[in-house]
């Protein structure tokens, strides 16, 4: 949530959208116009290697920036985009911004740096999704190897495994987002060509106070290890949470403790400062 847009405003948007069909249509056309006008911006949240504090990638998060500078949360407009089919042009626009961001970032980082883009469940039924995303990346002279796609556990319950194989063949890696909140069995997980598990922030939030969250987080780190996956803790806000993750040998973290999602130029500044600090640290 950007500053300046209070809870009251959120409530207004929410009630406008749920209570009135007419307003949903108004919001839908406003969103369509916003996508066309480039008002849906890609913000980047650093993903950090916990051991050295180095930024190794970022998650791309959509923000609807209104002409007056106010920002609308994806929690409000992503559902609308999903329900109206606008999620496809929205994702294409976000992927294009992600490519522009990567052009700026690439000279500063090693080839293992990745941007993670969120994909909605209902997009997985589109047979052209992979080709469409690849075309945007090719058009920017970049490689899909620099991109991870974040899918939720629930999105994968009925997924065609061939669809996931297509993404992998194209060079993308795959992350399971909000992991621990869905219902996938371990044997099913083992069949999925997933590279990364992202521990849901609802568990991280209640560390270290809540024993069950601590235990579940430990279990997910172990599952990731057993599956040969990377593991990322999301929503890390406090030094105590980070210390727990260090002790449990969780490899990566994202969260406000490091940084909130940033506009691209601010992310580049953050990255430069992070690299300066690491250089000094290793001298
Ligand atoms: P997500 O993919 O699980 O993203 C993580 C959310 O946690 C983001 O919320 C991020 O800003 C927030 N977050 C990160 N660190 C912290 C922290 O330390 N504390 C707290 N309280 N929150 C933290 P955001 O940006 O509002 O996005 C919400 C959700 O909207 C995302 O959840 C994702 O499911 C969806 N979303 C965002 N952008 C896109 C997009 O481009 N496409 C699709 N399909 N979905 C998107
Ligand atoms: Mg995500
Ligand atoms: Mg998540
Ligand atoms: Mg989420």
Image (cartoon, helix red, strand yellow):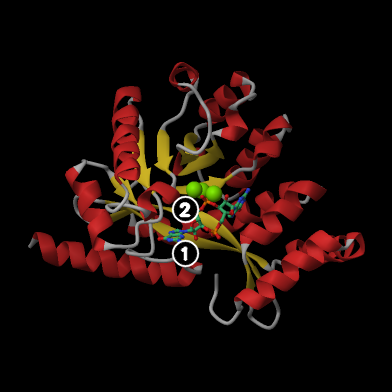
Marks 1 and 2: CB-CB under 8 Å? yes
**Dot 2 alpha-carbon crowd within 10 angstroms: few under 14, some 14 to 19, many 20 or more:** many
The answer to which quarter of the image holds residue 42 is bottom right
Q: Residue at position x 64%, y 78% from top?
A: 70
Numbered circles on residues, count: 2
Residue at image mark 2: 59
Mark 2 CB within 8 Å of ligand 2: yes
Image check: 247 left or right of 225?
A: left
Q: Residue 29: which numbered mark, if any?
A: none
Quadrant of image for the C terminus: bottom left
The residue lying toward the viewer, choosing from 238 and 149, is 238
Residue 74 in the image: x percent, y percent?
63, 59
- Residue in the image at 44% along x and 45% along y: 200
The residue at the far left in this view is 283
Q: Could you say where residue 28 lies in the image, as x and y percent from the top left? A: 83, 60
Name the disc covering residue 261, or none: 1
Q: Cβ(mark 1) to ligand 1 < 8 Å? A: yes
């Amino acid at each position: 949530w950007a500053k300046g847009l209070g809870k009251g405003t959120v409530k207004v948007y929410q009630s406008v959208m749920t209570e009135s069909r007419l307003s949903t249509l108004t919001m839908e056309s406003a969103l369509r116009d916003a996508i066309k006008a480039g008002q849906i911006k890609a913000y980047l949240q650093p993903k950090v290697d916990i051991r050295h504090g180095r930024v190794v990638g970022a998650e791309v998060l959509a923000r609807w920036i209104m002409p007056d500078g106010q920002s609308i949360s994806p929690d409000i407009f992503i559902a609308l985009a999903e329900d109206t089919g606008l999620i496809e042009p929205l994702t294409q626009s976000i992927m294009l911004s992600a490519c522009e961001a990567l052009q700026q970032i690439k000279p500063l980082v090693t080839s293992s740096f990745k941007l993670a883009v969120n994909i909605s469940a209902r997009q997985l039924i589109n047979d052209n999704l992979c080709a469409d995303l690849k075309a945007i990346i090719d058009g920017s002279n970049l490689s899909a190897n620099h991109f991870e796609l974040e899918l939720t556990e629930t999105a994968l319950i009925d997924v065609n495994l061939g669809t996931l194989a297509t993404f992998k063949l194209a060079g993308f890696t795959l992350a399971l987002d909000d992991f621990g909140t869905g219902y996938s069995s371990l044997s099913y997980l083992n069949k999925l060509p997933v590279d990364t598990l992202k521990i849901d922030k609802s568990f991280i939030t209640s560390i270290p106070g809540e024993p069950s969250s601590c235990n579940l987080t430990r279990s997910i780190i172990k599952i990731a290890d057993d599956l040969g996956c990377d593991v990322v803790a999301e929503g890390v806000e406090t030094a105590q949470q980070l210390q727990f993750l260090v002790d449990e040998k969780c490899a990566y973290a994202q969260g406000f403790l490091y940084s909130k999602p940033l506009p691209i130029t601010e992310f580049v500044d953050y990255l430069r400062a992070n690299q300066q600090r690491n250089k000094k640290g290793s001298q």
